[in-house]
Amino acid sequence: MRIYVSADMEGVAGIVHWEQVDASSQEYAWARRLMAAEVNALVAGAFAAGATEVVVNDSHWHMRNLLPLELDERVRLITGTWKPLSMLEGLQDGPFAAAFFAGYHGAAGEEGVLAHTYSSKTIHRVTLDGLPAGETTINAALAGALGVPVALVSGDEAVTAEARAVLGPDAVRGADADVSRPAARHLSGPVHRRRRHGFRHARRRAARCDRP
């Protein structure tokens, strides 16, 4: 069974400021290691639960954040820009049993750590059918159009609230508590990465979705 992962950075545990997700900042090298560690934990959980292949699409900014040498060697990595499907590039090359959205964040115009929708500088707010829509909602809609259910979303309270509204409570894992747009109360990175039971749960949910 194949699993697809779209990996963003702003929702990774320990990241709260734009400088941490900017490649020109001294903090960026540290932040990309946190991103890789969370992706690896998710991948390990997926394989432990029976996945046969995991495809990871680097989905943050210039999409060259994940270093291949730091990733689980079983991963197939999609990296670089520009990509026709952006944050979901490669999902069109299915079939996939399910998609996981890792390190996601809240929507532009909403409360949440580093909340934005695709471009923090040019997009103030996005709505879909009159309701606020972030990257989770938009990408879940595209995944659905491609016949792939979203089985897991990880990030802060803002994005997990959005995911619950769109996908239901079973898809949400690993929420951090929002304090303000540039601050949060985090579980530690190691705690997040030990929560592989959540990824196994998502894998089981993916298996249910994959049944005829």
Image: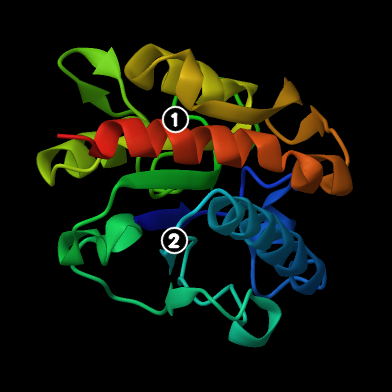
Q: Say which of 97 and 143 sits in front.
A: 97
Q: Is residue 157 above or below residue 149?
A: above
Along the polypeptide, which appears first: circle 1 or circle 2? 2
Question: What whole-number distance in Å separates the C-alpha atoms at marks 1 and 2?
Answer: 16 Å
Q: Is residue 196 above or below residue 166?
A: below
Q: Say which of 149 and 182 sits in front.
A: 149
Work out which quarter of the rendered image holds the C terminus and state it. Answer: top left
Q: Is residue 96 above or below residue 74?
A: above
Tell me which colouring the rendered structure shows: rainbow
Report whether residue 82 is seen: yes
Q: Are marks 1 and 2 in contact (CB under 8 Å)?
A: no
Label 1: how many residues lie within 10 Å, few (<14), some (14-19) or many (20+)? many
Name the secondary structure under disc 1.
Answer: loop
Q: Residue at x 18, y 36 (%)?
A: 144
* Amino acid identity at mark 1: Ala
Residue occupied by mark 2: 59
Residue 167: assigned label: none
Q: Position of residue 65 (x, y in %)?
A: 58, 73
Residue occupied by mark 1: 107
Q: Say which of 105 and 17 sits in front.
A: 105
Q: Say which of 81 and 75 sits in front.
A: 75
